[in-house]
Amino acid sequence: MYNKAMKFIINYWRNPSGKAPVEKYIDDIDNKEERAEILATLNGIQQHGTDAIGVEFRQIEGKLWELKIKSHGNQHRIFYAVQKGKEMFLLHAYLKKTPRAPMNEMETAKKRMKQLREAEK
């Protein structure tokens, strides 16, 4: 049976002052090619969903998920949550340097996910 990949609408989570931390994280990447690759990967997720090339999807816990994107020898991680079926909210991003996700990075993502859920009510 053919299983069509789920496509997403990508949104950047914004804090109460309107800033989008993941958008800033991507903008702050010095290497233009690396930045372009990450943006192309996010575009691929919107077009091809879970079949997008160059990214791995991993469930962290409950509704908190992680995108794994490798580019120019770096491992970028972007935590996200899905709302209303197919809206992907990018919550928090960091450059992976250790085997496990640092707890403070995960806690930041969980806090933002909680704020996202509360704002939806």
Image: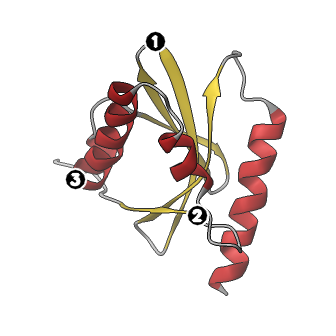
**Counting residues from the N terminus, which is met first, the one under dot 3 or under dot 2?**
2
Res. 73 mark: 1
- CA gap, disc 3 to disc 1? 25 Å
Q: Residue at x 54, y 38 (%)?
A: 28
User: Mark 1 or mark 2: which comes first in sequence?
Assistant: 2
Marker disc for residue 38: none
Residue at the location (66% across, 71% down)? 116
Residue 65 location (% of width, % of height): 58, 47
Residue 10 vertical position relative to residue 24 in the rendered view, above or below: below
Q: Which mark is residue 13?
A: 2
With respect to residue 117, does 96 lie above or below? above
* Front-most of residues 74 and 6: 74
The residue singled out by tag 3 in the image is 47
Task: Please indicate whether residue 39 sits to the left or right of residue 96 in the image.
Answer: left
CB under 8 Å between callouts 3 and 2? no
Rate crowding at label 3 as few (under 14), some (14 to 19) or many (20 or more) other CA atoms within 10 Å: some
- Foreground residue among 75 and 81: 75
Q: In the rendered structure, which amino acid carries the disc numbered 1?
A: Gly
Determine the CA span between mark 1 and mark 2: 27 Å
Residue farthest bottom in this picture: 121
Which residue is pictured at 23% across the width and 48% down the height? 48
